[in-house]
Structures are given as structure tokens and as C-alpha cells.
Amino acid sequence: MQTKTTLLLLVLAAATIGGIVLLERTVPSNRDRLEAAAAAFSVNQKAVDHIEVRFEDDRQLALAQKDGFWRIAEPYDDIADPDKVARLIAALSSIEVIEAIDRDEFEDEGWKMTGLSGPAAKVRALSGANTVAEFWLGAAAPLENSAYLMLPPSGNEPERAYMVRTDLLNALKAPQQDWRDTKLIHLPADAITKLTFTQPDGQIEVARLDAKSPWNLIKPLQTRAGKERITELLAALLNLDITASALPDLPATSTQPPTAPPDPDQLKITIEAPGLPQPWEISLKKPTADAPTVTTAQCSHRRAHFTITSKALSQLWFEPNDLRDDHLTRVDTETLTRVHITSTAFPEVEIKKENDAWLINRHGKWDPANGERVIRSFTALNESKVREFTSDSASDLVPFGLATPFLTLSWTEQPKTGAPHDSTLHLGQSADATAFYAKYESEPFIYRINANILPDIPPDPLKWKGLNVMRFSQFALRQILIRAGSQPPVTLGYDSTTSAWTCSIADKNVTADLDRKKADMLAGMLGRFSAQSWSAAGAEAYQALQNPALQVQVMLGEPGKNTGPTRAATLSFAPTQPGVVTALFYGKLNDGPDVFYVGKETLAKITASVLNTEAK
């Protein structure tokens, strides 16, 4: 009997376990239900191109993507607010299922509070013709930023409801009329490549190749446009705010109304950008003096008529010269590779950049040039403003002194990509030398310029010479001899193999009193000796240097050796006024043809004692 009972119990247990397993296999678990709901709510925001929302009061909102822009399809036709659309799509793509809920778990009043008995909104998202998500949105749930959702009934399947975390209620809170884009023109400034401004008295057109290219004035003149002015113009255009809108009255028949005469206060702006299927045309009424910041507008890409406002509205009415570039030059100094100057008073200046170093052609050979002056000069030219757009015709250059320019500046820019670009600028002056003018060789335009830019383009080749007077390594140094006026000469000997110094003053050995740190500093300063600037004093400077107040002779040999042949480099200095310790001194290296200026502070460092304090 006990055996039969045991067997019966075993059979019953096995049947129970089998039933449980079968039930688990055939009835979806809560986890399965949540995963299925998450898949149903999953929306790829990059793929969605159409959204439909029907609210409980039968209001409808339909959004559709067309030509790269989100438009409102219902209840009216217009460009949609991109921020509101982006928030809605983000909310659709980030629904997080918290738990599944069962209708049977709620009393009628409790179920009503979920908002699912009469949904606040029925939402459908599509990609092309395919529905990617469809659900009913109920009321807010007790948890923060959560709501109730329900999948619509499908065939014999029961209704499935869930508590989800979502921002949809907030994203759909805006009234229908607020989904309109309140910016009359909503484009990135960098995307716009062409603007045309048409009025009854003429047309003005500016264009560029792409966002990185400069703007050019195309009509009525072909010249450079002012970058700053175009930036202001784009800002004014892209910040026209809509304050009211109204649908136009459509004609009852297809009969075309008679052509009205041009409105002198009407401005038509045509905008072109690579992403637009066709140009946008915007018509603006010139604001009145009583309301200078308010006017009306129509757009080819938007059906309604608008009232718009902007503090910068008046900037959209201008003359062609207002858009011209008032900077004399726009040179990218990073791409400069060549500078050439010809003048009526000096030999030509020829400068080139080679291996990131600037060189000048002096006396038939390429010497180091003053690269800092090159950059400084073109920076000053870039900052210089045109005083007046004097003439748009080059038919008579004589009154401006441009038939025979007193100076011509040419340069080459080599961008990282593309061909090199050459420019030539001629400078002239009026007969009484009170007005100065400039003209690019490739353009007919004549500009009146400020005379204060002339010092930035010195015609003397000497002014472009590099300021490095003497360069040597201390490893090549053998001796420094300093003669300062009537003071006894100081001789410093150096052994580069041992880095040892010797010192004598008036042939007296004072090596024991030598401050080796001061000797190293003196050698370092002489090894990197630079002029303050080059002098054009000519005969006056040469006469002064016949009797130098200070001479420094440096003996140099083969680096790293203390024997073998040597060569001498001698620096000579004299005051710019005889017998006076002037702020600037003339200087010359060996018997070279060029004289430079150096400050007295530099000479004071050279003549400072190299002995230690006690010895002094």
C-alpha cells in the first residue's frame, strides 16, 4: 500500500512539474512581455521621417520630413520648429518600459486615471510607408517623468498597457500653432553660398564657393566683399523673428491678376545653399520710420504671410559699396612664400621663404631676411582700412599717380591645397603728395589709402635684412677681445675641449678672479648677437665708425678643437652723436657694407666686468 501511494505521489509530482514547464513555455513571462514592449516602442530617430499625432479632442498634428527640413503637414502647411521636432523624436526614441499593467488590476475609476480609456494622444511614427511605432499615450504616471502607454488592439490580441519613462507628454504639450518655426529663415550661416538682393533700382549679388572661401561681390561690381559686413548681413537675415502669420487669400479662379508696378519699398532676397533643392525667395516690405523694427514678409518655401521683427532690419537695405571689403589686403601670412618690392628710389627687394626660413637677395646671394618684419608688415596691411572707394574705372591713372607708381608690392600665397596665388598692389600719390592711392594690377578699382601704412612697406632692401648680426657656437670659440675707449683691453681665452676660461687685463693674468658664469653669459650673448634695426645713415655712420668707442673681436676655430686655424669676427660700435653716450649706437661687423643700430643697454652688458665681485 505504501508502495502504491509513493508511486502515485511521484506521478502527480511529475505531472505538476511538466505542467509548469509547459506553462512557462506557452505563456510569456513578465520579462518577455517587457522585452516585447521595448521592441514595439523602439524607434530609430534617424530613420523616422513622418509623425502623426491625434489628440483626444480630435486635434491633429502631422510632421513630415521633406528636402532635409521638417514641415508641418497638419493642421497647416509650414516649416516646423526644429527644436520641438528634435525633442519629440528624442522622446520617441528613448521610451523606457518600467512595468506592464493589467486592466483587471484596476477599478474603473483607477483605470480612468491612467488616461488610457480615452487616450490623450494616439501616436504613429513612420519611415517611408512603414509604421515603425504606434501606441496610445495616456496620462502621467506616479513616477517622475513617466506616463502610461498602450499598444492599440490588433486582431484577437488583448490590449497591452505599460508604465514607461518618457518625455512625450512634455514634448507634445505645445499648442498646434506653436509648432511653426518662428525664424523666418532657418539655415546655418555656413551653408549659404549666394545671396541676391533685388530692388526696383537694381540688383546686388554676393557669392562664395563654400564656407571656407571668401565672399565676393558679383553684381553690380566684381570685387572682394567685406567679411565682417557679410557676417552682419547674415546675422540680420537669419534672426528675423515671426510674430504673426496669416494664410494668403487664394484666387477663386485661375485668372492671373494684372501685373502691378514694382514697389519701391519691396526687397526680394534670394538665398542659395547646396542643401536646398531650389533657391529660397523672401520678399520684405521696407519698414516705416514709425516702426523701424517691424515689417511684413513672404517666402517661397512657406505658404503663410508673416509679420516679422528684428532690431537689425534696416541693415538689409544698403548700397553696393556698403558690402565692399574695406580692408586693403586679406593676406594669410601663414601661406606667404614670396615678397617683391620695386620703387623709384631704391633697388628692388626680393624675399622668399625656404624651409620655413625667410631669405633676402642681397648683392647676388641669399642672406637671412627679417621674417618678423614680413609678418608684421602684412599684418599691418591687413588691418589697414580703405579711406575711400575713389574710382571703379582705371581709364585715367595719372591723377592718382598710378600711371607711374612710386612703389609696387607683389606677393605669392601658397595654400596647403591648390595652386599658388599671386597679387600685385601699386601705390601712387597725388601731384601735391597730399593723397595716396592703391590699385591691384588685376582690378580696375582705385582706393584712397592712409599714408600711415607706408612705413610698413619700406622700399630700402636693408630694412628687410635679418637682424641676426653674428651667430656662432661656443664650441667654436677660442678668444674674445674687448677694447672699450681708453680702458685696458680685456682678453678672454676659451678651451672648448675642457670648457676652461682664462682672462687677462692689459696683459695681466687675472684668471683667478674670473667669474666663469659671467664669461659664459658674455659668450652666449655674442654668439646670438642681433641688431635692433638696420641704418640707412650711410656716410654719417661710416664716418662715426672710423673711430669706434667699442670693439669686440671674436676668434673662432673648428668646433670642439683648441688648435688649428682661426678666423676673426670684429664688431665695432660708435655713438650716433660724436662724444655723447646716445641711446642708440651705430654698429658694424668686420668691413661689411651694412650698418645697424644697437641700444646702449646691450653695450653695457658687453663691457660689464667679468671678474667676481671681490676682484672688481
Image (cartoon, rainbow, N blue to C red):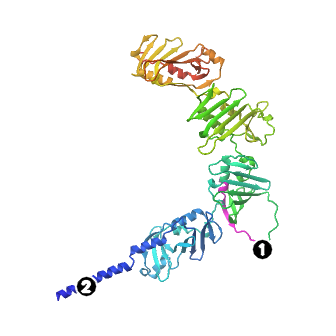
Q: Residue at x 73, y 50 (%)?
A: 218
Q: Does residue 140 belong to the magenta stretch? A: no
Foreground: disc 1 or disc 2? 2
Q: Identify whether 615 is placed above or below 366.
A: above
What amino acid is at disc 1? Thr
In the rendered image, the quadrant that contains the C terminus is top left
Residue behind mark 1? 253
Check the picture and name the quadrant holding the N terminus. Answer: bottom left
Task: Tell me the crowding category of disc 1: few under 14, some 14 to 19, or many 20 or more residues within 10 angstroms, Cα based.
Answer: few
Q: Which residues are magenta?
A: 235-250
| Foreground of the two, 289 or 509 | 509
Q: Earlier in the sequence, mark 1 or mark 2?
A: 2
- Which amino acid lies under the numbered mark 2 shown in the image of this protein? Val
Q: Which residue in the structure is indicated by mark 2?
A: 11
Q: Is residue 189 above or below residue 120?
A: above
User: Dot 2: what SS?
Assistant: helix
Sort mark 2 into few (<14), some (14-19) or many (20+) by Cα contacts within 10 Å.
few
Membership of 242 in magenta stretch:
yes
